[in-house]
Each structure stands twice: as structure tokens, then as C-alpha cells.
Image (tube, coloured by chain):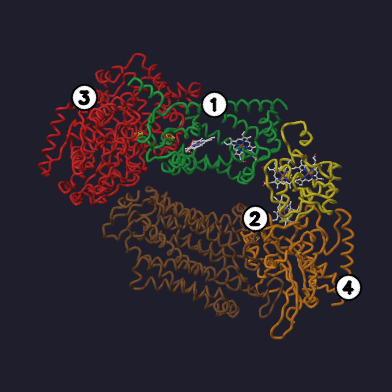
Amino acid sequence: MKEPRLQAIEGRSGGFYALAALLGALVAAGLWAAWQMEHHGHAITGMTNQIVWGLPHVFAVFLIVTASGALNVASVASVFGRKAYKPLAPLSAVLAIACLVGGLAVLVLDLGRPDRLVVAMTRYNFRSIFAWNIYLYTGFLAIAAVYLWLMLERRMNRYSRVAGTVAFLWRLILTTGTGSIFGFLVARQAYDAAIMAPLFIAMSLAFGTALFLLVLIGAFRATGRPLGDHLLHRLKNLLGVFVAVVLYFTAVQHLTNLYAAEHHGVERYILVEGGAVTALFWVGQVLVGGLVPLGLVYHPTLGRQRGAIALAGLAVLLGGLAQIYVIIIGGQSYPLILFPGMEVSSSFFDGVIHTYRPTGVELLLGLSGLGITGLITLLALRVLAILPAALGDEQAPAPAAGATEAVRA
Amino acid sequence: MAEQAATRRDFLRAGGALAAGVLLAPGVFLLGPAAARPAGEPASSRQRWGLLVDTRRCADGCDACVSACREENGWGGRGRPETDPQWIRKVRVRDPRSGRSFSLPVMCQHCAHPPCVDVCPTGASMRRADGIVLVDRHRCIGCRYCMMACPYKARSLEHEAVEDPRPWAPRGKGTVESCTLCVHRVDAGREPACVEACRRTGNAALVFGDLADPASEIARSVRELGGEALRADLGLDPGVRYLGLNV
Amino acid sequence: MADFETPALREYPDEIPPLRPGATAHVRPFPAAPAHQEPLGFPGELVEDWQARALEKMGDLLGKYRSLQVFLDACVRCGACTDKCHYFLGTQDPRNMPVARQDLMRSVYRRHFTLGGKIAPALVGARELDREMLDQWYTYFHQCSQCRRCSVFCPYGIDTAEISMAAREIMDHVGQGQKYCNEIIAKVHKIGNNLGLPGPALEDTLEGLEEEVKEDTGVDVRFPLDVEGAEVLLVTPSADFFAEPHVEGLIGYAKVFHQAGISWTLSTYASEAANFGMFIGSYENMRRIALRIRKAAQDLGVKRIVFGECGHAWRVAYSFLNTLAGPWDFLDKRYPVPQHMCEVTYDLIRRGALNLDPSANDHMTVTFHDSCNVARASRMGDMPGGQFHIPREVIKASVNKFVEMDPATTMERTFCCGGGGGLLTDDLMEIRVKGALPRMQALKEVVEREGVTHMAAICAICKSQFTKVLPYYDLPMDMIVSVHQLVSNAIQLGTKE
Amino acid sequence: ALAASTAARAVPLPEIVAPAVGPRCVLPAEQMRREHMELLRHQRARTVRQGIRGERFSLRLCIACHAGRDERGQPVSVAAPGQFCESCHRYAAVRIDCFQCHSGRPDPEAEAAARRIAGELAAGR
Amino acid sequence: MGAVDLLFVILSYAATLLFLGGLAWRIYRYARVPAPLKIPTMPAPTSRAGVVARMAREVVLFESLFKGQKWTWLFGWVFHAALALVLARHLRYFTEPVWGWVVLIQPFGKYAGLAMLAGLAGLWIRRLAVERVRYITGPSDHLILALLVAIGLTGAATRFAARTDIVAFKAFVLGLLRLDPQPIPHDPLVMAHLLLVLVLMAVFPFSKLLHAPGVFFSPTRNQVDDARERRHLAPWAAALEQSR
Ligand code: HEM
Ligand code: HEM
Ligand code: SF4
Ligand code: SF4
Ligand code: SF4
Ligand code: SF4
Ligand code: SF4
Ligand code: SF4
């Protein structure tokens, strides 16, 4: 099999500029929102002293989790030596970087004092998993960037496998770290569980693969480059497995919680009585994020159609957002228990379910994370040679890459 | 026992008045539960400051401690309860089985193993040598992870700009804050505002003192009456203890 | 064959090779004899006070060409161009790094025209223009094909070609000319084409072609010469009149005109598209040659001027002709002046005026070599990048199997064939072969990976150069084809009368 | 020292409000001009993190000495336009966020301490 | 105003004169020498607006260098971007009241200074480490880098090592601008910083730093690709025409 050539996209079409403008507008809107929050304080958001982390964190955690999974394709190629994935590895690394940067940007802009970012980068409390995460994230960025460079620079290729392995291990730790942000919150009924770490790893694989599939299909379609079905089908099967694993861990998470009496209240809240949270759990997370994509991916006829595969990817991402919403918001809505078994009330909302009504600025800020991710990916596709010029099925002689390229010139 | 406490209290009240008087003399900070540290000397682990809340004496309709704290430290009062900070709050507790109910003030518990400090990425949340847990607001980035971690919901984010902060209690938008155990008073050898206010109501449900000093009133009470921790199951060894939670 | 080693082909894209100082210090062209020099207005041999005269000429040029003035000042020695020149990649001689080549002139400029060089020459690398320096100039400014690849990557667009041209102009002015170029220019001035092919010989050749085409296709395709009142004056490189594969291109043009029903003619007076005046940086000579075309067009009363496949000729035509020999207000205003043959064919294809059957070329898998002067110094069509797009579209209309070479070696990043800039002479064979290395590597890659059998080009120099050089790299010499040769194969004559 | 020379010159300089308590600063003015930010930063870590109080580089003390008064004799924030901190910082384009949290007005307790320190300084201690 | 102050005042004026005069003389020459032929490097924009956009990309993003060499681009771009920021930040010494946007960018100063030094270090290391670049590097190339590094170091040191009296320093600068000389704060670091900057200003018009104005005059980048539509004729070439 001849190895496909990687080639930057032309990026002169109206569609390219329209997409870039759209993403740019998202980013600008997010910056505006962040400025508003900085200027007026968090009072203008829906976040309160009860719901401490809101929509920005949903998007940020979603992107960070996805980042780690987006690198999966590269890992499969270089760590597990699947040659078929190799031409896709650079795109996978770029996507991982883009997601992480997008997620971190949202996280930083949501800080109460974003102007003190430098403090966050220079002062560390090494007992804090959060501080470790700062290292994990910046380290991940650095490693993914080096890995990308090694892959793109021909004379460095021979080292890329080592870097790939480091990146692979690093991202396992990273997702564990992200999961542990919640796992370490002993005070909160919804989080205090070791299962958080493996659950987050499974989520990252599912979301990352889904996003990768979407970008892959989109990019090849938009540039008119040929894309064979073979690889696509392998990827979608992989997606199916990951989605199933997420469902499995979700089930285990809730079943073990149900086993422990002290968690009954919060489980009841999320699974039955939580209103929007419950709806998001069952419809968003389980149905859209789990069952629908499984059905699409493994359906004998639909599963072969590119549109259906893309739809499955989209469903996994939407379901993923819902899942993280349930974890973050749902977990906070349920009140802290100061006096087990007692009824409590106070001026500070003790003992009541907290409501969260996100405002526009939060949504804009969160969406701008997606915008940043998209913009970075788009720019990278344009200036770096990371997209295969053609990715036909091995046997079928792919039409010349440049041919289609030139038509577009 | 109760009697004994009362006399002691009277003594303290007198002491407080005296202290207030003395304070008018510039630079001379004297008396109180502990002597003011001399200039240049850091807080020391020989002390462990704490509070004892006697829920049996805490009156149901009273919130003098809360308003005293608000007055002293300048928080709250915008009429937006969801976002306004609350360093201390009155919590009403009712046992659905027995129907018994009581109320008590809850503020930062000044845990000996504070989760807020553990999780804080920048080290802004910190525990002083003498057990007072503070947010170094010069270093706080407003990430709110400590709020997620605190089991007592003791912390608030200042959601808006602060108009006219107290000179002794700086506070500002975008940082997280909580009860400082009135550190500026304690360092000057005085007792916290809430304690003072409670005594003024006559309920005297709050006692401030050095848990590490076996001779102090608070240490003795805890020893003898068994000052309980909220959520003792978490094992955080808070410096704020309660009496009469489970009677 | 000359006594040098053909460089080993390395995998493309390639690691940048280590330096080998002086690797091609011995390669230099034959100097021009007085007979070649004088018709161009240059002294016959190196003059007595050459140093003073050279500096005077340099000062003159600094006042005439902003490019030279700015380029000599602006270079920061960033090194972006160092690995961009095919001659450097092929020879590893550090003097062939564009900036080092420029520095030969820059050091003299510093010494004589800047304050720093006058005060502290050692500090700023200023040097005298002595005999040794002149020799280096002669050597290395004749190891530059003026392909402009370096200028694409230079942050200030410093174009070593401009400096080479200036250096050659200065050397010509002190009598140190290059034989190959100057001899040819003299021929054009005298006879009208590079080969010195007189009118009757030309007529003969064209008649032969008519017969050949008739034999092949059974159709009477004309090759008119000096026809007054024709619509189109075709100016094409003289190689097209007889050499393979060039002539196949000429046949292609004739078939296209024939099928489209456009009346056309060649001219004996301006029977050459090439303009070597550019290579020696001589505005005057370039202008003299260009004016022949003006005169021919006026004499024959044509409405349009079309250029055949030739790279630097198209540069002079597209970018300079209007300046040198314009204005062209006596021609048909509906057409740009001049037009490239590919533009003509492309327009006809788009209008459906040609009947092409690409399966006629099914025995070929074709790739396209962008000729440097077309790619980086001129345009076709009305959009930036038309010079890349249009020839490819013409090829794709004529051929089923088309493949691109590595994008780092095509379009504006294309590698020179190694024979441009007046170096297409046997005395420079070593540099020509070595300079072709990067293109050969990229070609070899698609030969092996995609099974490419032919490489099309639209430049007479490229075609001649590749015919010579391909065998050095174990590739067949007839791999190289004209673009209009592909059209010629595919066109269905007799179907659109 | 700078303020005095302002009037005669074409070169603008910040108008520095004369301190309410004198005669000297806690360190020579030359040095304060250069180093006050480091001193304050150092002091604040000592006070907040270690609980060291009553030292000379306390922000509350600076304010106690340096806060100006309005027409009615009321203290004005040192961060108000034209006041001590602000006048210099505007000139030097330095924006400080201290007064987002800190009150720029003196409180009696600190004023008392400042007077005590002024006494010490006058006595050369 | 002591002798040292006076010396600095005189040197400052002298260097400024040299800088402005030299630059004007060069720019005048670039503007006056004609470009007789159309030589834009293709593909080139076909309109004036396109040329402005191309030039903006070159000047702001170093587009061509990015195509050419990624590492050099990275270091070079970081250096120049940081330099631009540092210089913009320096405007606070020259304006009173300070312009709003200059106030806004002040907080980035420390990092800009460090980034500038990092970029310079990268460029310098490449000069020493990459064989090809070493070959084309002369003493003056090292000297310019050394000069800039020294400026950066002394500048950063006034912030990190020994603070200076910014207010007095600004008064000194304003004094120069308003022709009313003021004393300079007698801190060795600022005096060294200023002295080195004066050296830089003095050599600017006579060194490769001319690339800064030069890039705007580069015909391969600033010409419109319209040779067939518009006749382009230099005055001296037009003179040849007379003898046609
Ligand atoms: C329009 C403004 C400018 C542009 C577009 C520009 C662009 C560039 C570019 C593209 C390079 C080559 C890449 C590199 O080596 O960094 C370069 C190099 C350099 N520039 Fe600039 N520059 C500008 C202004 C300046 C100024 C104002 C200075 C100095 C005060 C400066 C100092 C340098 C130096 C020293 C180098 C060489 C670095 C080395 O030795 O490797 N540049 N410039
Ligand atoms: C007349 C021109 C200049 C004056 C008056 C001047 C003055 C100063 C002063 C007073 C500082 C100290 C800032 C502080 O302590 O906060 C400084 C810092 C600095 N200067 Fe300059 N400087 C000049 C030109 C330059 C130039 C041309 C460069 C670079 C090529 C430069 C680079 C720096 C750097 C990197 C710093 C440290 C970072 C910063 O504070 O921005 N300076 N300069
Ligand atoms: S009560 Fe909360 S804020 Fe206070 S020390 Fe304990 S964990 Fe920290
Ligand atoms: S909000 Fe402030 S104190 Fe709390 S964890 Fe974050 S940085 Fe630490
Ligand atoms: S100790 Fe001080 S800060 Fe804490 S609750 Fe009491 S009054 Fe408020
Ligand atoms: S002041 Fe005393 S009695 Fe009143 S609420 Fe507070 S603790 Fe209870
Ligand atoms: S113009 Fe071409 S041949 Fe000449 S130096 Fe540049 S790259 Fe080399
Ligand atoms: S790329 Fe341009 S500036 Fe850089 S060394 Fe080459 S000619 Fe000089």
C-alpha cells in the first residue's frame, strides 16, 4: 500500500471563509461575554454561591475530555502500530491540541480573576489535583505539539513512536486527573467515587473518536478529497465499542451508588426527580448519547451510510455534553448534607435543591470554546500538511490527489 | 457547670469592655482571650484558635452573630441572596423523627484538614499556623474549586464589585471569601465580632479561645462537654465545635 | 559525458545536505568572444580599468533598479533561502545558497557604497572587487538560473535573479560576458531567432510539418509563415521548429488553430519567443529583441499576439512586453496582449470549440512540471494562480491519468529544471545535471508511487534540459512532453469543421 | 521633591499630595519611589500568610499617612484621581488593583499607629 | 543637571538625529529609485488592495518566512512581536497624559521583555548551530544580536533586579521631547539601557536593520500583477523611448 500524501487544504473557497468567519464570530462573542463577566462580576451569570460551576465548566470539561480522546487515533497508529491510521495521526494530534486549548480558554476566562492567570501558572499547591492538572494540561499540549512535529518533519519520523507512547500514557493520566477533580470532592454526594476516573477515560475515548469522525468526514467532503469506506467503518466500530463502555460505566456508577444508602437521595434526584437534570440524563445522555449512536453504528444498512455515521458521531457529542451537564450541574443541585437525616433550612439555601438558570454570557463563553477549537483546527488544516490528499480503500486506485485540488484552485 | 460558665462570661464581658477602652490608647492592644502578638512575630502553632457553639443556648429567632459579622466585615446586603456572600448563616435543623428542632450558626469550621486548602491550585486557600483557615485573596484566582470542596458550604464568591470595604477587612470582586475568624481582631488580641455580639444578646452561645491551651475555657468545655464536629464522619477536625447537636 | 558524478537520488522530501565548500568552484561557462560581445554594445574583452568601470556601472544600476538597491540593503541573513536553491541542493556548494550568492555582490556594495563598509569593512563583511572576486562572480552568477525560487521564501522577497542579472550586466559592461547567451542574442539581433535559422530554412521546415500532419491525420493543417492580415501572430521558441519534443507542441498549436478556425501566422522577422536579453540583465538588449515582435505584428497587420510554450519567453512577454515594446493599442482590444497558447486552448476548451478525446493518451500517466518563469514570474488568465490552473486544465482535458508531484515542488514552489537563466549549454553540464536533482527526486517519487510515465512542461528550456538530463538519473529521455503534444494527440481533427 | 519643581517647567510631573503625617517616610523617599511595590508585596505575604502585624510597610499605614483631605477636611481615598498613589501611577501608566479590595481611606486605628511610627522616625528609629 | 546628565542629553539628541536623518535618507532613496520592470513574485494580487493585504501579511505574520523555515519563523516572529509590544509599552515615557491603549498593554511588559529575549536566544542559537546559517553569518550579525540582547537584559533588569525611578526617568524623556532637559536617574542599569538604545538608533540606518523600511519597498512584494493591463514605464526607460 502506498502511503497517502499529506497536504494542506486550499482554503480559498467561500465555504472556508464563511466557516472561519462563523468560528471567529463565536470566539469574539465569547471574548465579549468574558469581558462582561470580568467587568460586572459573576453576578451577571446564572452561577451562584450554590451552583458554583456552570455552563462554562460543562463546555470546558467536555472539550478537555474530548481532547484526550481525540488523540486516540494517533495512539492507535503509533502505539499499537495500526498502519492504516497513520496518515490520520497528525490530524488527531491537532484536534487534541485544539480541543484542549478551547477548553482551557473557557476555563481561564471564567475565573473570577482571569487577570491573575500568571498566578495560576507560577504558584502551585502540589496537594491540589487542580494544580496537577495545570501541569497535565500544559504538558499534554507540549507533548502533543512535539509529537505532531515529529510526525510532520520527515527526518524526525523515527522518534514519533516514542512521543506517541508518551502522549498515550500522558493522556490516560490526564483524563484520570480530570475525572479526579470530581472524584476528590468528598463533600459532594454525587462525585465521591473512584469510578469517576475510568468513567472519564471511557467518555474521552467516545467523545474524541466521535469528534474525529465528524471532522474527518467533514474535511474530506468539503475539500472533495476521496475517502474510502474501509477506515471509516473501522473507526465507527471503535466508536460503538467506546459508547457501549461509557454506558456500562454509567450503569455501574449509579448501581454502586444505589447500593450505598447515603447516596440514595442524590441518585433519586438524578434518576427520577431532578426535572431537567433527569430528562437530560435519560434523553440526552442515555438515549441520544448512547442508544441512538449504538443503533446507528451497528445497524446493518444505516451503519454503512456516511451520513448515519456522522449523525452517530454528532449524537455522541450531544449526549456527551448532556452527560457532563448532569455530572456538573446535577451534582451541585443536590444540596450538601450537613446533618444527615435531618431537615434543614437557612438563608443560604441549605437543604433545598438549587436551581440553575444559565444566562447568555455563560452560553456564549462556553460556545466560544467550541469556536476556538474549530478555528485552530481550521487554521491548522490550512497552514499545515496534516490532511491526507486522498484516503481511498487500499486496493481501489485512488484518483490523483492533486487533480481534485487543482480544480479548486 | 452552666453557672460557672456564666460567671466566666461576665468576666469576659467586662474584659471586652476593658479591651475596647484600652484600644483607644494608640498601639496598645491588650487583653482578651489571648494577648496580641508583638509586632513582627508570626502566628504560631502553639495556638489553635477555635469556636464553641452551644446550640442549646442559641436562640431560635436570633441572628445577632450574623449581623455582627456582616457589620464587622462588610459583606452582604445587596438583597441578592443567591449571589451575595454569607460568611455566617443561621441554620434551622429539625429531626423529622422526633420533631425536635434547634438552630445554630454555621461559618467556616477552620478545619484542621481542610479540603478547601487541599484542592486550591494556587495555594490561596491556606491554613495559618494557629489554625485559622484563610483565603489569601492576593493569590486567589476565583476558580471556586474550594467552594466545590468545602462540605460546609462555608465559602462564597464575591460576585460583584465591593463598594466601600472595611479598612481592616479588604474584600473584592472575583475572589472567594469566608469567615476569617476575625483574624484582624484575633491578631490584635480581641475576640471575633460574632462572639462579642452573641454575648451582648445575653445568650452567650459562642465561646472563642485557644483549643491548644488545656486551661482555656473552650478547651475545657470541649473536653468536658464533648464539643462535636459537624459531619464528624469526614474527619476534618474542625476548629468550630458544637454542643447539643444530638440530644 | 563530462567527468563528474551524478548526485545520488535521495528520497523526497529530503534532508538538507551538508555543505561542501567550493564543490562547484571550477564550473564556469566559456567567456564570450569579442564577436559575441560587440554586437550587443559591450567591450570585446576585459577592459583595462575594469574595476572602476564595474563600480561605476554598479552605481548606475543602483540608481536604476529599486530591486537591487533594496535587496542589497535589506537581507538580514535569516537563512530562509539557504536550502531553497536547486543548485545548492544538488551541488552542496554553500556559495550556491541564494544569500551567499547575493553576498558576492553585497560585500562589494558594502565596501564601496555604505558607510559601515567604508569604516569597518571586516565587521560587516565588506570586500574589494578584485580579480578573485570577479572570478567568483563569473562562476556563481552563472550557477543561478534566475528561477526566483529563493524569492518566494525570503521574508522581504529578495530575488537573487535580480542580483544575478545585475552582476551579469556589470560583467558584460567590463567585457566579461558569457559566450552562450551573448552569441545567441547576437543571432537574434541579426537573423531573428536563437538558432540563426534563416527564413527559407524555416519555410522548408514548416512545409515538412504540414506533410507530416497530413500523413498522420489526413487533414490539411496549415503552418503559415509571414501571412499578412492573419488574425494571430504566433511567436514561439525556435526549438519548436524542429527539436523533439518541442515540435510536437507546435503541431498541437497548429491543430488547435485549425479546429478553432483561427487564422494565424508565424513571422520570419520575429521567429523567436525567447529573449535572452533578460538573462544578461540588459534592458536595452531585451528591448531590442522585443521590438522585433512589435515590428512583425505591425508589418503583418495581425490582431492578436500569441506566445508558444516557453517559460522565460512568457515572463518577458507577460510581464515586460507592454513595458518594453508597448503600447499595443493597434491590436484587438478584446484580447490581452500577449496571450499564452495555453490560454487560447483553455478558452476554446471551455467554449466547447475543441473536440478532445483524452483516451488517446491512455498509454500515459502524466505529471506536470511548473516551469519556474511561468510559475513565479507571470500569470495566465484573469485570476492569480491562473498559470498553475490553466495548463493543468488543458492537460486534464487531454489526458485521463494525471498525477501531481509533491506540493512542495510544484506551483510557486516548483524547482527549476536546472537549465534556465542562460545555462543551457554543454560547458555547464555538471551544474545542469546537479541542479536537476530536486526535480528528479520529486519525479522519481511519483514514478515509483503512482506509475507516472510522462512529465509535461510548457517551456522550451525545460524540455531541452530534461531531454539531456533524464538519462543521468536513469529515466527515459522521452518522458518529457509538450503540453500541446498531449492536446495534439487528443484532438479529433475533422470533427468540428 | 519632584512636586516642588513642577511649576517652573514645561515638563509635566505628577502632583504629589503632601503626607498628612510627617516628617519622613518609613524609608528615604528616594528609595520608596523605587521600591515601595516590592516592600508592599513582601509585607502583604508576611501579614496575610504568616500573621505578622504591626510592621512599617503595612498598606494601612501608608494610607494613614498619605491619604489627602478634601475641602471639608474629610480623608479622600489615596486611589482617587489626583491623590497620592493615583497621581504617580497615572503618570507612569501603572494600574494597581489594590483598591478593588482595600479601602483607600485611613481608619483611626491605623492613623494612631502611623503617628506612633512618625514619632519613632522623628526620633531616628 | 550634572555633567553626566548633560552628556546623556547630548548623546540622546545626537543619536536621534542620526537615526531620523539616516532613515529619511534611506527611505528617500528607496522611494526615488524606480522599479523599471514588473517583477512581483507570483502568484501576486491583481489590485492595490490585494497588495496592501499581502504586505500586511508579510509584515504582521512573516508569511513568506513561515513558508520557508518554521523554526526561524517561530523565533523571529516571537522576537518581533514582543519587540513591538515592548516598544509600544515604552510609549508611556513619551506621552503625557499616557494614551489609553498604551495604559492597557502595560501589564504585558514583563512577559514581552522575556519573550523578546527568548526569541533572540533562539535566533542566536540557530546562527551558531545550523551549519548553513553559520556560513552566512558575519560579525555584524552577531553584534546586532548582542546589542539587542544587551538592551533587553538591561531593560528587564531594571524590573527584576534593581528598580529605577520611573517617574524621574519619564521626566528625563519628556524633557528631551520638550527641549527642556531634565536629569536622568543615576541608576547604572537605566543609563546602560539608554546608552545601548542610543547605539542601536545610531547604527540602524547603516545596518541590516534597514529590512524594516526595506520590506515595504520590495518590488517583488509591493507590485500589482497587472502588467498586461497597465503599461509600466520608468522615467529612464521612457527616455530610451525617445530615441526609438
Ligand atoms: C516592519 C518591521 C519589521 C519586519 C517586517 C521585520 C521582519 C523581519 C524578518 C522577517 C526577519 C527574518 C527572520 C528572523 O531572523 O527573525 C527579521 C530579522 C531581524 N529583525 Fe526584523 N523586522 C522588522 C523590524 C525590525 C526592527 C525595528 C528591528 C530592530 C530594532 C528588527 C531586528 C531584526 C533583527 C536583529 C533580525 C535578525 C535576527 C537574526 O540575526 O537572526 N526588525 N526581521
Ligand atoms: C528611548 C528609548 C528607550 C527608553 C527611554 C527605554 C527605557 C526603558 C526603561 C526605563 C525600562 C524599565 C521599565 C521598568 O522598569 O518597568 C525599559 C525596559 C525595557 N526596555 Fe527600554 N527603553 C528604550 C528603548 C528600548 C528599545 C529600543 C528596546 C528594544 C530593542 C528596549 C527594550 C526594553 C526591554 C525588553 C525592557 C524590559 C521589559 C519592559 O519593561 O518592557 N527599550 N526601557
Ligand atoms: S469549613 Fe470549608 S472553608 Fe472552612 S476550612 Fe473547612 S473546608 Fe475550608
Ligand atoms: S477560588 Fe481561590 S481560594 Fe478557592 S480554590 Fe480557587 S484559587 Fe483557591
Ligand atoms: S469569626 Fe468573624 S468572620 Fe467569622 S463568623 Fe464570626 S464575625 Fe464573622
Ligand atoms: S448571636 Fe448567639 S444566640 Fe444569636 S444566633 Fe448567634 S449564636 Fe445564636
Ligand atoms: S534564483 Fe533560483 S537559481 Fe538563482 S539563487 Fe534563487 S533559487 Fe537559486
Ligand atoms: S531569505 Fe532573504 S533575508 Fe533571508 S537570508 Fe535569504 S535573502 Fe537574506
- x, y percent for residue C179: 26, 24
The image's mark for residue A70 is none
- x, y percent for residue C157: 42, 36
Residue wearing tag 4: B7
Q: Colour of chain C?
A: red
Mark 1: secondary structure = helix
Q: Does mark 3 have its CB less than 8 Å from ligand 7?
A: no
Q: Colour of chain D?
A: yellow
Q: Is residue C166 depicted above or below A377 in this figure? A: above
Residue type at mark 3: give it: Ile
From mark 3 to mark 1, how far is it between C-alphas?
Answer: 51 Å
Q: Is residue C87 depicted above or below A327 in this figure? A: above
Residue wearing tag 1: E22
Numbered disc in front, either 4 or 1? 1
Q: Is residue E42 depicted above or below A42 in this figure? A: above
Residue wearing tag 3: C191
Mark 3: secondary structure = loop
From mark 2 to mark 3, how far is it between C-alphas?
Answer: 81 Å
Write down the quadrant of residue C169 in the picture: top left
From mark 2 to mark 4, how far is it between C-alphas?
Answer: 53 Å
- Chain under disc 4: B
